[in-house]
């Protein structure tokens, strides 16, 4: 094995051959993948109580996810085109009466209700993020094929979930107004604005939305107060629709075909310059003192659809503040 030459010991190189084991690298993990090699879908269950809303599995077989009937194929195509979806129970989001439309004879409506709608969305997107809100409803989101000018964002802070699409132009001033860091995004600003409105309420909700400048639409849900907060910008720059399904659930999405498949004719574009809350219903943040009136809408086939809501310039809301003239006896009002 060794050989001594001139007092120096040398090792025969033949005895150094062999396999060298590499030390394992720490903190390096491979991304988890499903059976088909795609990344697993993220599913979050906020409410651990048993509810009718399904908890989507991270692995679905091809036989179960493949649509069979014509109605299922139509709903599957619509779910694949949608990128934002929210379904709320009537207890947290009551549907306006003007949004309902009588069913059309022979109309194709996806069967299975809201649970099947969320399941179809999760099956159509490999990167889908689904959030089960228990009996209150569910949220779904996908970041695929988004525009850099109007990106889609999703976030949650202190049990407040927010879906956002668009771009806020005055984001710097809003960060300073709400005392947020420079790394805050539009979702963080909206959640903080809602928390300020909920806890302290220094401004009306219409003023909070009116302070947002840019192209946007967002869906916010508070699990503590079980409240929804939905809004769209004054120009309606982002495609956004809402409707009511056969189970009386209020549905919001960015894809009109998904609303047609799940709600039939009981859907309409979300009114621009308006916001919807659980406590106040649909209101206009551009004209907060005016009422909104439903305007009947007819499609290209002559069928009645969900109404469009417009600002009624003649109907004023009751401010609740009694007004009296200068000649009245003011002593009775103190």
Image (cartoon, rainbow, N blue to C red):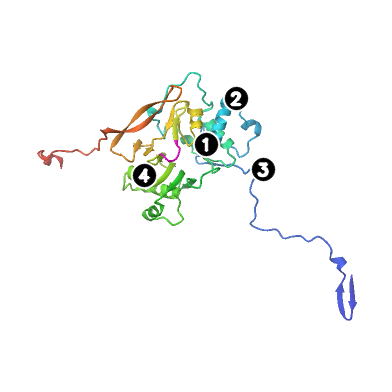
The residue at which mark 4 appears reads as 209
Give the CA distance from mark 1 to mark 3.
Answer: 23 Å
Marks 3/4 in contact by CB < 8 Å: the verdict is: no
Q: Secondary structure beneath disc 4?
A: helix
| Sequence-first tag of 1 and 4 | 1
Packing grade of label 3 (10 A; few <14, some 14-19, many >=20) is few
Give the image location of residue 112, x and y in percent: 54, 27
Marks 1/4 in contact by CB < 8 Å: the verdict is: no
Seen in the picture, residue 228 relative to 304 is either above or below; the reply is: below
Picture residue at 67% right of the left edge, 43% below the top: 37
Q: Is residue 267 magenta?
A: no
| Sequence-first tag of 2 and 1 | 2
The residue at which mark 3 appears reads as 37
Give the CA distance from mark 3 to mark 4.
Answer: 43 Å
Q: Secondary structure beneath disc 2?
A: loop
Q: Residue furthest top?
A: 105
Give the CA distance from mark 2 to mark 3.
Answer: 27 Å
Q: Secondary structure beneath disc 3?
A: loop
Packing grade of label 1 (10 A; few <14, some 14-19, many >=20) is many
**Which quadrant, please, contains the C terminus?**
top left
Give the image location of residue 124, x and y in percent: 58, 36
| Sequence-first tag of 1 and 3 | 3
Is residue 54 visible in the rendered image? The answer is: no
**Magenta range:** 236-240
Q: Main secondary structure of the magenta part?
A: loop
Packing grade of label 2 (10 A; few <14, some 14-19, many >=20) is few
Q: As drawn, is 168 to the left or to the right of 326?
A: right
């Amino acid at each position: 094995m060794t050989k001594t030459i001139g007092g120096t010991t040398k090792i025969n190189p033949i005895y150094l051959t062999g396999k060298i084991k590499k030390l394992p690298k720490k903190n390096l993990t491979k991304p988890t993948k499903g059976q088909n090699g795609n990344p697993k879908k993220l599913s979050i269950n906020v409410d651990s109580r048993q509810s009718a809303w399904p908890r989507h599995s991270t692995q679905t077989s091809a036989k179960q996810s493949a649509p069979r009937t014509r109605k299922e194929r139509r709903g599957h195509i619509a779910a694949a085109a949608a990128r934002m979806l929210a379904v709320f129970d009537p207890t947290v989001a009551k549907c306006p009466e003007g949004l309902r439309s009588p069913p059309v004879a022979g109309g194709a409506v996806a069967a299975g209700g809201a649970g099947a709608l969320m399941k179809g969305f999760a099956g159509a997107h490999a990167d889908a993020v689904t959030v089960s809100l228990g009996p209150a409803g569910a949220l779904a989101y996908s970041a695929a094929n988004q525009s850099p000018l109007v990106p889609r964002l999703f976030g949650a802070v202190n049990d407040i979930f927010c879906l956002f699409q668009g771009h806020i132009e005055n984001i710097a001033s809003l960060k300073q107004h709400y005392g947020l860091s420079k790394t805050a995004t539009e979702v963080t600003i909206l959640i903080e604005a809602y928390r300020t409105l909920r806890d302290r309420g220094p401004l009306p909700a219409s003023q909070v939305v009116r302070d947002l400048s840019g192209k946007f639409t967002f869906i916010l849900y508070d699990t503590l107060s079980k409240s929804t907060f939905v809004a769209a910008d004054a120009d309606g720059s982002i495609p956004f629709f809402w409707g009511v399904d056969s189970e009386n659930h209020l549905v919001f999405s960015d894809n009109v075909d998904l609303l047609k498949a799940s709600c039939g004719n009981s859907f309409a574009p979300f009114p621009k310059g308006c916001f919807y809350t659980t406590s106040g219903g649909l209101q206009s943040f551009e004209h907060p003192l005016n009422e909104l009136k439903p305007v009947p809408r007819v499609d290209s086939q002559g069928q009645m659809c969900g109404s469009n809501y417009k600002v009624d310039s003649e109907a004023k809301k009751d401010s609740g503040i009694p007004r009296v003239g200068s000649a009245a006896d003011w002593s009775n009002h103190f």
